[in-house]
């Protein structure tokens, strides 16, 4: 997987490794033209038409070929396609100033044909979560408000920040979670057992069979910037605040 380090985020690299080795049923990978790590491998064109900047970004074909080459050398099954994403900007007077088109490349990957078909046919968040191998408790709780807290993206960083502020050492098995657990209250010891067991299974396998990947995954988790403060929204989610910290040499 050495060649993938340059084109995949560490989370995608981990999930792909787990799928290829049969521990995880499927994963979704987006090669985004806006990904900073792919900056030198993205083609950009720009022109001004009727005072509107038209910007086009496209992931280079060699990036796509690198991932295909790796997958074709494994027993994994996959489907890929180019994906067009459009965004626009306006000034304070309501005049359009920019039209940006991003051509990204999407991969659905599974350890077997049946798993790939299940992922491709999934429509709801529940179906997608189960196809990706998330614990049923996590899937059922997603976007629900439990004890006043919505189980969505902000739930994890706030839970981790609370634990860190309480002086609790963050367990490294959390580095192997790519879903929102039903419960992640480290301060009071209320952590979903199914999420913990699955993450520890992943961690033990990667540590034993790919220690370099395990080291990078866990270090990336430990280096993760957590919110310094947060405010609960009316819907039960959180708005997080991150303080800027200048580099030591400045």
Image (cartoon, rainbow, N blue to C red):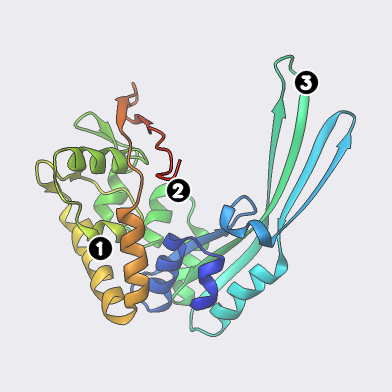
Mark 1 vs mark 2, CA separation in Å? 24 Å
The residue shown at (70%, 16%) is 92
Residue closest to the eye, 169 or 23: 169
User: Where does the image place residue 69, in percent across and percent down from the top left?
Assistant: 60, 80
Identify the residue position indicated by label 2 in the image. 124
The residue shown at (54%, 78%) is 71
Say which label, 1 or 2, has the lower sequence index: 2
Task: Report crowding for label 1: few under 14, some 14 to 19, many 20 or more residues within 10 A (C-alpha).
Answer: some
**Farthest right residue in view:** 50
Say which label, 3 or 2, has the lower sequence index: 3
Task: Report crowding for label 2: few under 14, some 14 to 19, many 20 or more residues within 10 A (C-alpha).
Answer: few
Identify the residue position indicated by label 1 in the image. 199
Q: Secondary structure at mark 2?
A: loop
Mark 1 vs 2: CB contact within 8 A: no
Mark 3 vs mark 2, CA separation in Å? 37 Å
User: Where does the image place residue 182, in percent across and percent down from the top left?
Assistant: 24, 46
User: Where does the image place residue 223, in percent across and percent down from the top left?
Assistant: 34, 52
The residue shown at (72%, 56%) is 58
The residue shown at (26%, 56%) is 174
Identify the residue position indicated by label 3 in the image. 95
| Image position of 73 with respect to 57: above or below | below
Q: Secondary structure at mark 1?
A: helix
Would you say 73 lies left or right of 62 here?
A: left
């Amino acid at each position: 997987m050495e060649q993938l380090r340059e084109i995949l985020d560490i989370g995608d690299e981990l999930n792909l490794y787990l799928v290829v080795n049969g521990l995880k049923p499927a994963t979704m990978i987006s090669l985004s033209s806006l990904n900073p790590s792919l900056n030198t491998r993205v083609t950009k064109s720009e022109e001004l038409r009727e005072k509107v900047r038209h910007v086009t970004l496209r992931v280079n074909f060699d990036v796509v070929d690198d991932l295909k080459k790796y997958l074709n050398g494994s027993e994994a099954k996959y489907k890929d396609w180019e994906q067009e994403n459009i965004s626009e900007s306006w000034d304070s007077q309501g005049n359009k100033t920019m039209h940006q088109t991003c051509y990204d490349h999407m991969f659905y990957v599974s350890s077997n044909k049946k798993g790939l078909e299940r992922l491709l046919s999934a429509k709801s968040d529940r179906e997608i979560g189960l196809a990706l191998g998330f614990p049923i408790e996590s899937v059922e709780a997603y976007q629900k408000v439990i004890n006043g807290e919505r189980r969505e993206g902000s739930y994890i960083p706030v839970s981790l920040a609370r634990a860190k502020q309480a002086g609790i050492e963050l367990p490294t098995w959390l580095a192997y979670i790519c879903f929102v657990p039903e419960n992640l209250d480290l301060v009071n010891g209320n952590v979903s057992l199914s999420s913990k067991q699955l993450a520890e299974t992943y961690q033990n396998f990667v540590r034993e069979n790919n220690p370099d990947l395990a080291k990078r995954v866990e270090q990336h988790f430990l280096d993760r910037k957590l919110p310094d403060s947060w405010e609960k929204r009316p819907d039960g989610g959180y708005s997080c605040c991150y303080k800027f910290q200048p580099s030591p040499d400045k």
